[in-house]
Image: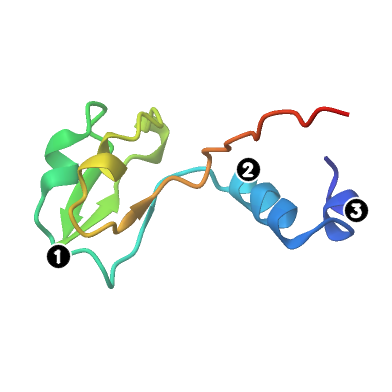
C-alpha cells in the first residue's frame, strides 16, 4: 500500500500502515513500573532498564517474539506489528 492510498483509507487502515512503519515494541513509560520481567524474558536481550524503566536498547536484536508483551503485568508493552485478519465473508 502506498502512502497516497493510505491517506484515503479508513482510520484503522492508516493505523496498520503506521505500525508497518515502526513495528518495534512500544513501551509506555507511564505504565512501566520497572519490574524487570520483560528484560528477563527477552530471549534476544534486546531490552534493558534505564532510570528504573524498560526500554528497547538493541532494536536490531528484537525478534518480535511477543515474550515482553505477554509477560508485562502492567500492559505497558505493545507490539503494533501484529495484524489479525478476519475470516473471509461469504458472498
Whole-percent x and y of residue 77? 33, 53
Q: Which mark, by number, is residue 33?
A: 1
Which residue is more in the foreground, 75 or 40? 75
Foreground residue, 44 or 83? 83
For the C terminus, the image quarter is top right
As displayed, is residue 26 above or below residue 66? below
- Residue beneath the point at 19% across and 44% down: 38
Q: What label does residue 20 carry, if any?
A: 2
The one nearer the camera, 73 or 40, is 73
Q: CA distance from mark 2 to mark 1?
A: 28 Å
Q: Pinpoint residue 21: horizontal percent, then vertical percent.
A: 63, 47
Q: Which quadrant is the N terminus positioned in? A: top right
Density class for disc 3 (Cα within 10 Å; few <14, some 14-19, many ≥20) is few
For the residues bearing labels 2 and 1, Cβ distance under 8 angstroms: no
Q: Regarding mark 1 in the picture, which secondary structure is present there?
A: loop
Report the residue marked by disc 3. 4
Crowd rating for badge 2 (residues with CA inside 10 Å; few <14, some 14–19, many 20+): some
* 59 over 77 or under it: above or below: above
Q: Residue at x 28, y 73 (%)?
A: 30
Q: At numbered mark 2, what does the secondary structure look like: helix, strand or loop?
A: helix
Horizontally, residue 52 falls left or right of residue 55, namely left
Q: Is residue 5 shown above or below 65?
A: below
How much space separates mark 3 and mark 2, taking CA atoms? 15 Å
Amino acid at each position: 500500500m502506498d502512502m497516497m492510498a493510505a491517506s484515503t483509507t479508513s482510520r484503522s487502515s492508516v493505523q496498520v500502515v503506521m505500525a508497518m512503519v515502526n513495528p518495534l515494541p512500544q513501551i509506555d513509560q507511564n505504565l512501566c513500573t520497572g519490574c524487570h520481567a520483560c528484560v528477563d524474558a527477552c530471549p534476544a536481550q534486546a531490552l534493558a532498564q534505564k532510570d528504573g524503566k524498560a526500554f528497547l536498547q538493541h532494536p536490531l536484536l528484537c525478534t518480535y517474539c511477543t515474550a515482553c508483551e505477554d509477560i508485562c503485568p502492567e500492559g505497558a508493552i505493545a507490539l503494533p506489528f501484529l495484524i489479525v485478519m478476519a475470516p473471509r465473508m461469504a458472498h
